Amino acid sequence: MDQSLNDSGWRGSQEGWLEAAYSSLIDAGVDAVKILPLAKKLKLSRTSFYWFFKDREELLGALLARWRDKNTGNIIKQSEAYAESLAEAMLNVFDCWLNKDLFDSQFEFAVRSWALQSSEILEEVQRADQARVEALTRMFMRFGYEAAAADVRARTTYLVQIGYISMQSNEDIGLRMKRIPEYIAIYTGQVPQQRELDRFFARHGYKPD
C-alpha cells in the first residue's frame, strides 16, 4: 500500500497527464501535445507516462473523449432540462455559453483547429455538430415546432455560437447579457418573461443596471 502511494506520487496520475495535455492543446495546439515536453512540464520521467497511457494516440483519444463528454454532453443535457417555455429552454442552453464548467469554448476552438490537420478529428467534430443540432432540434419540437422549422432554428442557434467561438469573440459580459433577450426572441420566436431572465441572470451572478 505504502509503495503504491509512493509510486503514484513519483509517476504522477492519469488526470495529471491529461490536464497537462489539455493545457498544451489550448496554449499551442495539438503538435505541442507530446510526451517529453509534458513530462518536463510535470517534472516527471518520460517513462512514467506509460503507466497511464499506452502511447500518445491513447492520450489524444482521452483528450477527445473529455471534449466530447463535456461540450457535446452538456449541450444535450441542457437542451433536455426542464423548462416551462421554449424561451426558458433556450436560456438553459445559453448556460453553456456562459459557464465554462458546462462548455469550454477554448477547448472547442482548439479541437476545431486540430480538425484542420486531421480528417479523423474532422469527422469527430462533424459528428458532434450533428448530435448538438439534433438535440436542439428536439428541443424546438418539444415546444411545438414542426421538424423543418425546428431544424432551421436549431442550426441558426448553434451556428451563431460556433461563429462566436471561431472568431474568438471577446464580448463584454454586460453587453452580452443585455443582448440575450433579443437573441432569445430571434431564435425562439418568444419574448422571454422577466422572471425567466431574472433566474438566468442570477445563475450567472449578473445584476442588470
Image (spheres, grey):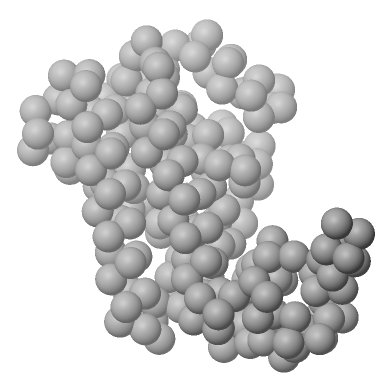
Above/below status of 62 relative to 193: below
Identified at 73% across, 87% down, the residue is 47
Judged left or right of residue 38, residue 112 is left
Between residue 199 and residue 173, name the one nearer to us. Answer: 199
Identified at 83% across, 81% down, the residue is 44
Q: How many marks?
A: 0
Identified at 61% across, 57% down, the residue is 170
In percent of width and height, residue 98 lies at 58, 40
Identified at 68% across, 65% down, the residue is 14
Assign the N terminus to one quadrant of the image.
bottom right
Assign the C terminus to one quadrant of the image.
top right
Judged left or right of residue 177, residue 9 is right
Between residue 14 and residue 95, name the one nearer to us. Answer: 14
Residue 31 in view in this figure: yes
Q: For residue 50, which quarter of the picture? A: bottom right
Above/below status of 169 relative to 50: above
In percent of width and height, residue 147 lies at 9, 34
In percent of width and height, residue 57 lies at 49, 81
Q: For residue 148, which quarter of the picture? A: top left
In percent of width and height, residue 156 lies at 27, 46
Q: For residue 90, which quarter of the picture? A: top left
Above/below status of 142 relative to 53: above
Residue 208 in view in this figure: no
Judged left or right of residue 64, residue 140 is left
Judged left or right of residue 139, residue 178 is right
Between residue 8 and residue 15, name the one nearer to us. Answer: 8
Above/below status of 154 relative to 115: above
